[in-house]
């Protein structure tokens, strides 16, 4: 069986990659291992037999002539050591793989949780947007009601002005037809004109009665519109309050969504690593 010599300092076999040195006692070592030994040992002795060694008694480099077939022959002990080393490396890689898989599983679970959080926040955002749309429609409807109430107030003021004008001729309209005719004759107006004016005054009286009824109805309408306006203002105030709250919730949801996106980005970066 071919001899497989090794360095007793580092326990590695000799090969062509490192120089081999010898001492006069006959023991051989890697040159670098021997130099480190002399630098750290308390005395300059052979690492194997402990004989005193002088600087001139060291052969710094040995040359070996090996046949080609001898260089390729590996003994059982070397193969066993190589196999044990490979097994140890494989076991280490498997442990690293299991650890990496555990980290990947944890990151995957975290990513799924983040995705669920993002989905929940998206649903909340959609609901909030729907609520905002509904509140906008309600606000538009209330604004329309407010415009109608404003128009009704203008109409009530117009009717009130007209009624005030009609009240100024109330004294004349309270008289009967003969009295009105007498009043017009005293003014020096002709008979036909008197009859025409009398009919006109009576018609005005009837119109006045109708206007009084219209005024009463307008007053009731104005009262109802004032109540509706007060109710609309209360509803509008409530809607504005709810809209402010919704805006705050929407900002909070957007911040949570941005935070979730950052955490997902960091999680994905860790997975790639």
Image (cartoon, helix red, strand yellow):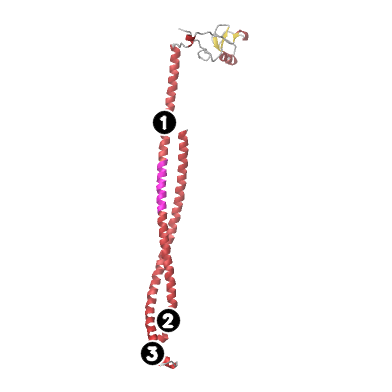
Residue drawn where x is 43% and y is 63% of the image: 143
Q: CA distance from mark 3 to mark 1?
A: 113 Å
Magenta highlight on residue 62: no
Q: Is residue 99 left or right of residue 30?
A: left
- Pinpoint residue 108: horizontal percent, then vertical percent: 41, 36
For marks 2 and 3, the one nearer the N-term is 2
Residue 91 seen by the camera: yes
User: Where is residue 136 shown, x and y percent of the image?
Assistant: 42, 57
- Dominant SS type (magenta): helix
Q: Which residue is mark 1?
A: 101
Q: Is label 2 in a helix, a strand or a loop?
A: helix
Q: Which residues are magenta?
A: 114-130
Q: In this rendered view, identify the residue nearer to me: 64 or 115.
A: 64
Residue visible at 38% across and 76% down in the picture? 214
Instruction: Characterize the local packing of mark 3: few (<14), some (14-19) or many (20 or more) Cα atoms within 10 angstroms.
Output: some
Q: Residue beneath label 3, please?
A: 195
Q: Residue at x 46, y 49 (%)?
A: 252
Compare marks 3 and 1 and give the one earlier in the sequence.
1
């Amino acid at each position: 069986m071919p001899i497989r010599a090794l360095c007793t300092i580092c326990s590695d076999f000799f090969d062509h990659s490192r120089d081999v040195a010898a001492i006069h006692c006959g023991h051989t070592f890697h040159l670098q291992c021997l130099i480190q030994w002399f630098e750290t040992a308390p005395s300059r002795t052979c690492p194997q037999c402990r004989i005193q060694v002088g600087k001139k008694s060291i052969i710094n480099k040995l040359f070996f002539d090996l046949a080609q077939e001898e260089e390729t022959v590996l003994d059982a002990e070397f193969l066993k050591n190589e196999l044990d080393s490979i097994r140890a490396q494989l076991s280490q890689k498997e442990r690293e793989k299991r650890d990496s898989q555990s980290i990947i599983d944890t990151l995957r679970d975290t990513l799924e949780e983040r995705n669920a959080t993002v989905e929940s926040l998206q649903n909340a955002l959609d609901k909030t947007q729907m609520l905002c749309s509904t509140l906008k429609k309600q606000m538009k409807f209330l604004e329309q009601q407010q415009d109608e109430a404003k128009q009704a107030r203008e109409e009530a003021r117009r009717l009130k002005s007209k009624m005030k004008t009609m009240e100024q001729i109330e004294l004349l309209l309270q008289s009967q037809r003969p009295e009105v005719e007498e009043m017009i004759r005293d003014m020096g107006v002709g008979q036909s004109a008197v009859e025409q004016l009398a009919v006109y005054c009576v018609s005005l009286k009837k119109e006045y009665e109708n206007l009084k009824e219209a005024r009463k109805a307008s007053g009731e309408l104005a009262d109802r519109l004032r109540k509706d306006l007060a109710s609309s203002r209360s509803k509008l105030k409530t809607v504005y309050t709810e809209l402010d709250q919704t805006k705050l919730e929407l900002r909070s949801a957007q911040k949570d969504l941005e935070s979730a996106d950052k955490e997902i980005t960091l999680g994905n970066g860790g997975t790639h690593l």
